[in-house]
Amino acid sequence: MNVEREFAPALLAWFDRHGRHDLPWQHPRTPYRVWLSEIMLQQTQVAVVVPYFARFAAALPDLPALASAPQDEVLALWSGLGYYARARNLHAAAKQCVERHGGALPRDLDALMALPGIGRSTAGAILSQAWGDRAPILDGNVKRVLSRLFGIEGWPGLPKVEKQLWTIAGTLLPDSRLADYTQAQMDFGATLCTRADPACPACPLRAGCIAHRDGRTAELPHVKPGKPLPERVVHMLLIEDEDRRVLLQRRPPTGVWASLWSLPEHADEIAARDWFERHLVGDVAGAEALAPVLHGFTHYRLRILPSRIAGVQPRDAVGDNPGLRWASRAELQAIGLPAPVRRLLEDG
């Protein structure tokens, strides 16, 4: 099998029979909807993204609507999807498009990559799917497929290996059906050439696959050398007033969960108690310890130790502080909250 010559035709034939043709961003397939889907799909599976995309696109159906929306609305629509920097970058990029590109995404690789949150692979996916341009992509699925097919040694995240993969991806591009080809690559890696237990007997490329020939599908691509993740512990206060409204605190504009609303968070119990006594009146000594909540980030694990304090009354400092607000349980649904905090409130 001549892999370079037969890759695109074989992949497109497979896609016609087994690919995903009814994803919401494909109908209609506009630059804005393609861009929104690509940002949501970064580090997130299609099945998770679909309902979030539908809700987001219904509320903010085009780029000008996104650009003019308040950040709180954007973050609320994103709430639960994780990696919130994506939402902030999406919002900032929309504003830049209004200011610099007439309210539309630019049809240019460098101009797209100059926007917040858009790297080379995402820019290629937008160009190929929105306009049918010949632009390669290199997301995790494509890296895995090409590493196995061509027997590429080394972790794909290394610059030298990634450069080699980009070169290969560029040589395999077909002359037509670029939107289908791009979707086919993502579908192929997500559903057939999977990380664990790839379906090699059903693979139309197995005759030319080096990893299959050499029995190395479990070994390729090489994984990143790992080390145990450190753990960070925080104390959160689930504070309720006499009407069971919850006290929320705005997160800082940078860092983890930037600009989202969350529960007041402190490094230890002493700091939490001191903060409570400065802002509220209530029985902090009778706080109810709730079950710990574990949440994984890329570089560390977070252990949340929550405590509930009910029936409290605010001091004047709460009402005068724009970084604090009371929210009823019904209002929480429309507020951008970190996923583990939302779960904690739902369980509590």
Image (cartoon, rainbow, N blue to C red):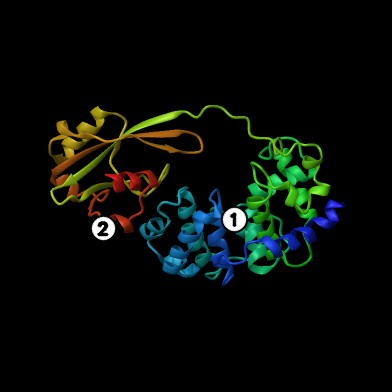
Side of 187 where 258 appears, left or right: left
**Residue type at the position of mark 1:** Ala
Indicate the quadrant containing the C terminus: top left, top right, bottom left or bottom right: top left
Q: Whole-Å distance between the Cαs marked 1 and 2?
A: 39 Å
Tell whether 330 sits left or right of 171: left
Residue that appears at 51% across and 59% down: 93
Task: Indicate the position of residue 233 as horizontal and vertical percent values.
Answer: 36, 30
Residue 315, disc? none
Q: Position of residue 207 (x, y in %)?
A: 83, 48
First reached walking from the N terminus: tag 1 or tag 2: 1
Q: Residue furthest front?
A: 201
The residue where tag 2 is placed is 330
Residue 52 picture location, percent across and down: 46, 59
The answer, for residue 114, to whether it is visible in the render is yes
In the rendered image, is residue 110 in sight? no
Q: Residue at x 83, y 57 (%)?
A: 6
Q: Quadrant of residue 67?
A: bottom left
Assess disc 1: are there few (<14), some (14-19) or many (≥20) residues with their C-alpha within 10 Å of its C-alpha: some
Whether residue 152 is situated above or below residue 8 in the rendered picture: above
Q: Give whichever of 136, 4 is nearer the camera.
A: 4
Q: Secondary structure at mark 2?
A: loop
Q: Nearer the viewer, residue 113 or 74?
A: 74
Categorize mark 2 by other alpha carbons within 10 Å: few (<14), some (14-19), many (20+): few
Kindly identify which numbered label has been placed on residue 114: 1
Q: Quadrant of residue 187?
A: bottom right
- Residue type at tag 2: Ala
Q: Secondary structure at mark 1?
A: loop
Q: Where is residue 280, by image quadrant?
A: top left
| Label 1 vs label 2, nearer the camera | 2
